[in-house]
Amino acid sequence: MTMKRSLCAGVAVLALMGGQAGARDLKFAPGEDARLNWDSFEAFRQDLSGQELTILGPWLGPDKDLVESVIAYFEAATGAKVNYSGSDSFEQQIVIDAQAGSPPDIAVFPQPGLLRDLASKGFVVPLGDETAKWVAENYAAGQSWVDLATFPGKDGTPGLYGFFYKADLKSLVWYVPENFEDAGYEAPKTMEELKALSQQIVDDGGTPWCIGLGSGGATGWPATDWVEDMMLRTTTPENYDRWVSNDLKFDDPIVVNAIEEYGAFARNDAWVAGGAGGVASTDFRDSPKGLFASPPACYMHRQASFIPSFFPEGTVIGQDADFFYFPAYAGKDLGQPVLGAGTVFGMMKDSPAARAFIQFLETPIAHEVWMAQKGFLTPHKGVNPEAYGDETLKKMGDILLNATTFRFDASDLMPGPIGAGAFWTGMVDYSGGKDAAAVAAEIQKTWDTLK
Amino acid sequence: MDNIAGTKSSLVWAVHLATAALVLLWVLPTIGLLVSSFRDRDQITTSGWWRSLFPAEQNIVYRAGDADTQRQDGPLWVIDGNVFDGAGGEVTAFGVNSRAPDAFAPGAEADLKDGVKLAVQANGDYRLTAPAQFEGRSPRIFVSSVTPPRFTLDNYRRVMFAEGLGRAFLNTMTVTIPATIIPILIAAFAAYALAWMEFPGRALLIAAVVGLLVVPLQMALIPLLKLHNQLGIGKEYIGIWLAHSGFGLPLAIYLLRNYMVGLPREIIESARVDGATDFQIFLKIILPLSFPALASFAIFQFLWTWNDLLVATVFLGNNPDQLVMTGLLRELMGSKGGEWEILAASAFVSIAVPLIVFFAMQKYLVRGLLAGSVK
């Protein structure tokens, strides 16, 4: 009886929830905020009422509210009903669901490597040449975004399998401006200045860097970002691409050099809070806290654009904390390379509603609604940069648009056992004191076994 | 004899001490978790829970009140307040520069630029004065202080009043109760047959069941979900009931069969002689006698399905009407696991129901643990 009763209650609450979801509010009333492109919203209107769409993604909590605020406009424009659900074990869940035959209509992949895997097994529907053409024309560095999401399908023919939406910027150094003022430091413009500043901080009795690699099962990934940034600053983008595809071997002197460039920061006891030994054992979520300690445990922290969520409560970005571009060597003619990442939407089941949703992501309004809130960067050239919700995002958007080279996070592009395995553990070993060449050789050995 | 009596009493003490030490050892992590659940994130990261009961030395960076809280006092503009925001504490030193955060003793006056002066008293009251009106951001005050122990209910508040917790609780119950009852029903019949009914291949069947005990359930996830999809069950409650039942059955059958085999043969045989059918024997004799074993397995299965996240993630959707409590608590931690300070509190919230079940059925658990071990 208990079982039946709770079931009935379940059904009742379910009906209630359904009613609420239908009346999702629009964050900005259509036509009101002049920064947003309402024409694109009106132009997108079509009738899909009665259709349902399920989306599975990695966003939870506040991020989930944000993505749902965008989805609400799709619902308003089409009448379709969208169920977004987030999961923090998205990577595992999507694989299980795809293989068992119950995938969502659309999946939001945090990195393209997994999408490539699933596409090659035939679980993803190609988006078609029209979409590819649109991305190439309308995204900054459009062709590179197309290439990033173009994979061979099950039968081997390459196609566009993913639509990039929401970019992250990785080449950032976070600092507390007032600490810099107190000590009389300036944000450096070149890598040479950055290294000189680090040494000066040590000479003044401080510690320049906070670095933490701990991240549970993914421990080591922050170091892979360091090495990727260093690759872009010590060698050509072409070599970077060859490195991703393993044409350039992992144990090549060029790569070993980049690893050692990272080591120049992370393995220097005087340069890292807690000493080089603390790097691998400090959690990446805790490492930025040193910036805000009294006296400061460190002055700088290199991390991607999402890290402010781990700053102490009440920290105002742009005032209490700020960032500068992780600079390039003035002495090397490599321009202003930027490392980034992004989430990519893949269509798991073909339906008119899913097709329409991908089309919706092409409209400026789908980008601007999230931009006007927080934590969203886009390479979409057709959006109004004034729509960015705060100065910080605008500044990041500028870095993204001014980049002479944009490269995607290499570890996300490498095969899973490397990019989400050997590379991570290798970096932990290296940070712990192992020789760079030996670590690189081991990663290459793992890569060889995959072929 | 006196001797023996004397030895006995000192041994008792040793036993008591050893027991106390062991209990302490086992309970210590739980106590730590309980204490941590009442502390906020910054406290957890800066000091261990064992130090939470004592006044802590802390270096605080405090942002002086906003410029629009200033008032005019004679020729001076003043911003004042308390660096502890009323929470209490004692200032041992303060400073105005991150390079020298403890440059001044409480009560002293520090000079900032442009004639701005700052004084901080030992009780945390500060007074910021300037000859001209304050503009822009107020300066930071660095305070070295001794603060009394401080506990907060925020973690519990966030977990207990999280959106959808009630719903998730219902969902968990919807999963747990049938997933406990179904395997017991099936296993009791099976165990009786394997224990008391003669048929060819019985030993092999028992061996197969024991063999299934070592098969990791992770292996079955994808094929099973595939099967559910093909049968048209998909991601529904019926699917997870079946899955949980299947994963629980080997242990249930093994446990109950071993217990039933140990029941006195005479009772069953005399019942047979009196003309009872197998079903009557099962219903009237075996079931009542096996109650401790049934109850203990029920506790096991209940705890396992209650705590389960993996099976629920695979066989149920992520939408609010199917999200179980473990899934919801995990989601509360946010996309990148940043809100981990609620972990301790959520552990205690989610443990409440299993604790009730455990204490209600505790006496069976102890008896049931021995089930099948002694013949």
Image (tube, coloured by chain):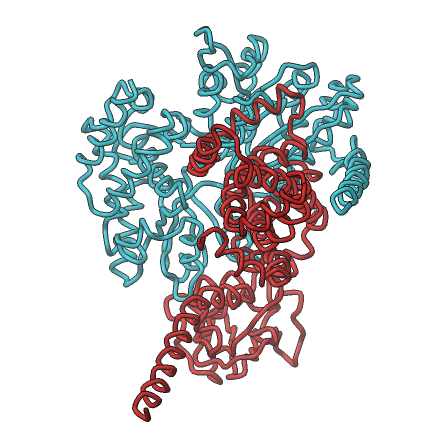
Q: For the point 47% across and 66% down, which residue is it?
A: B32
Q: Quadrant of residue A435?
A: top left
Q: The N terminus of chain A lies in which quarter of the figure?
A: top right
Locate residue A313, reporting x and y percent. 55, 57
Closer to us: A438 or B192: B192
* Whether residue B333 is visible: no
Query: Left or right of B247: which side holds A386?
Result: right
Locate residue B11, reporting x and y percent. 34, 82
* Whether residue A90 is visible: yes
Q: The C terminus of chain A lies in which quarter of the figure?
A: top left
Examine the rendered structure and indicate whether residue A437 appears above or below residue B140. Answer: above
Query: Left or right of B333: which side holds A143?
Result: left
Q: For the point 53% across and 39% down, which residue is it?
A: B310
Q: Quadrant of residue A202?
A: bottom left
- Outermost residue, front side: B273
Locate residue B277, reporting x and y percent. 67, 38
Closer to us: A334 or A113: A113
- Outermost residue, bottom side: B2
Chain with red colouring = B
Locate residue B121, reporting x and y percent. 52, 83
Q: For the point 28% across and 63% down, which residue is it?
A: A205
Examine the rendered structure and indicate whether residue B204 appears above or below residue B24. Answer: above
Chain with cyan colouring = A
